[in-house]
């Protein structure tokens, strides 16, 4: 087995090589590599991909997303570990430990993990590198019936009856559509105006800077522009390359929206980055003035109705609390958890993260 590493400066050469085109399994998509190469917080020498090769084929890999954290009044280099995969036929041979050790040797003092698969929690706990996970508690609301989307795992009973579930969803949502037509509206009123924007202006940037003081990653205009410009998921049908990559790279519907809420004096009171993937709405980044929670939640309800979305997931404490107590058109609401593994070398007793921090905003 051979482990090769790729940096921000070499990743594009790798994905355009003849070798890459012949791999049965690819360790990164071409557009994700493009995003890594343009990361405004990465240096050209930052190692971003650790790949195990066996017989000139990919046996496993782990990715690293270079980042910065504002820690003890200064910026500190860190990374989010991401996209950990081992080919099933090579599992149990120590490849996962070797890859993980390589990544931690490079970033061990500041490596963080979130958005991981539930089955990997024990693996990270056993490494000894991390504090017990810090867990963010969020809420998920279901506006429409979507049994065919949320029940079937890969294989199993629900997968076999998926056509039946789709039929049930269709029939129930006909009735649900009638319910929503007669449901009370959630108008923001004349005091607030919604504006969809392509670029972040100076006033909005000032609001972002002010609100960012409470967060550790503090992603601002350069980072948000990068996320919008270089997504990891493209809105298109599955293709040969996406089938070679284990993680998400395409989706039937995927887009970001940037939204400003302005008051009667035209002052920006809130800025939101929305992400829609298929029928699911998330809000990776929210920056707003005090007391705007109720109006933001009203806007989000209307967005779901406008796009006929099935569900919304929010971890922002203020917005999640507002949804819990608000009268809403949701059929069902449930608590959702997101653990964060933080290194023992950093003392972060009460870390504050946005919903999109780490690689969450990209997926």
Image: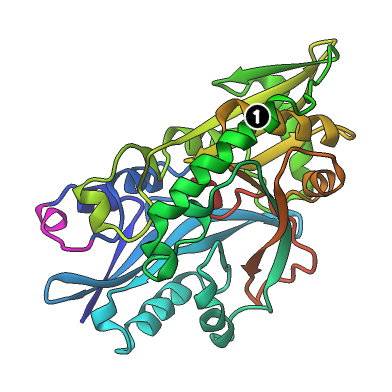
Residue 157: x percent and y percent? 42, 69
Is residue 349 rendered to the left or right of residue 279? Answer: right
Residue at the spot 24% in from the left edge and 81% down from the top edge: 89
Quadrant of the rendering where the N terminus is positioned: bottom left
Residue 177: x percent and y percent? 62, 31
From where the camera sits, is residue 339 visible? yes
Residue toward you, 170 or 11: 170
Residue toward you, 116 or 304: 304
Dividing the picture into quadrants, the one containing residue 191 is top right
Residue at the spot 40% in from the left edge and 60% down from the top edge: 161
From where the camera sits, is residue 46 visible? no
Q: Is residue 145 magenta?
A: no
Q: Is residue 347 above or below residue 7?
A: below
- Residue beneath disc 1: 178
Residue span colored magenta = 18-25
Residue at the spot 50% in from the left edge and 76% down from the top edge: 120
């Amino acid at each position: 087995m051979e482990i090769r590493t790729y940096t921000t400066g070499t990743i594009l050469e790798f994905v355009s090589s003849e070798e890459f085109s012949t791999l049965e399994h690819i360790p990164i998509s071409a557009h994700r590599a493009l995003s890594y190469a343009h990361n405004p917080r990465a240096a050209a020498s930052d190692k971003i991909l650790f790949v195990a090769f066996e017989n000139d084929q990919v046996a496993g890999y782990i990715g690293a997303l270079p980042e910065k954290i504002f820690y003890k009044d200064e910026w500190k280099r860190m990374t989010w570990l991401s996209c950990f995969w081992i080919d099933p036929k090579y599992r149990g041979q120590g490849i996962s430990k070797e890859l993980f050790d390589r990544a931690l040797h490079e970033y061990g003092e500041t490596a963080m993990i979130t958005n991981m698969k539930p089955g990997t929690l024990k693996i990270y706990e056993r490494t000894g590198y991390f504090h017990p996970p810090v867990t963010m508690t969020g809420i998920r609301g279901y506006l429409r019936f979507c049994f065919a989307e949320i029940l079937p795992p890969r294989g199993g009973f629900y997968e076999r009856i998926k056509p039946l579930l789709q039929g049930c969803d269709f029939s129930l949502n006909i009735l649900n559509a009638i319910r929503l037509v007669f449901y009370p509206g959630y108008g923001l009123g004349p005091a607030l105006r919604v504006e969809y924007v392509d670029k972040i202006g100076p006033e909005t940037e000032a609001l972002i800077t002010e609100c960012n003081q409470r967060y550790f990653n503090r992603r601002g205009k350069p980072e948000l522009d990068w996320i919008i410009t270089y997504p990891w998921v493209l809105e298109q049908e599955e293709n040969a390359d996406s089938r070679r990559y284990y993680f998400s790279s395409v989706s039937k519907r995927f887009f970001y929206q940037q939204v400003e809420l302005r008051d009667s004096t035209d002052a920006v009171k809130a800025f939101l980055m929305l992400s829609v993937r298929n029928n699911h709405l998330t809000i990776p980044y929210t920056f707003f003035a005090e007391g705007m929670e109720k109006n933001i939640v009203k806007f989000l309800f209307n967005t779901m109705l406008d796009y006929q979305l099935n569900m919304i997931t929010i971890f922002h404490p203020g917005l999640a609390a507002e949804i819990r107590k608000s009268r809403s058109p949701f059929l069902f609401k449930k608590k959702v958890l997101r653990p964060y593994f933080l290194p023992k070398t950093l003392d972060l007793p009460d870390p504050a993260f946005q919903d999109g921090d780490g690689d969450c905003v990209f997926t």
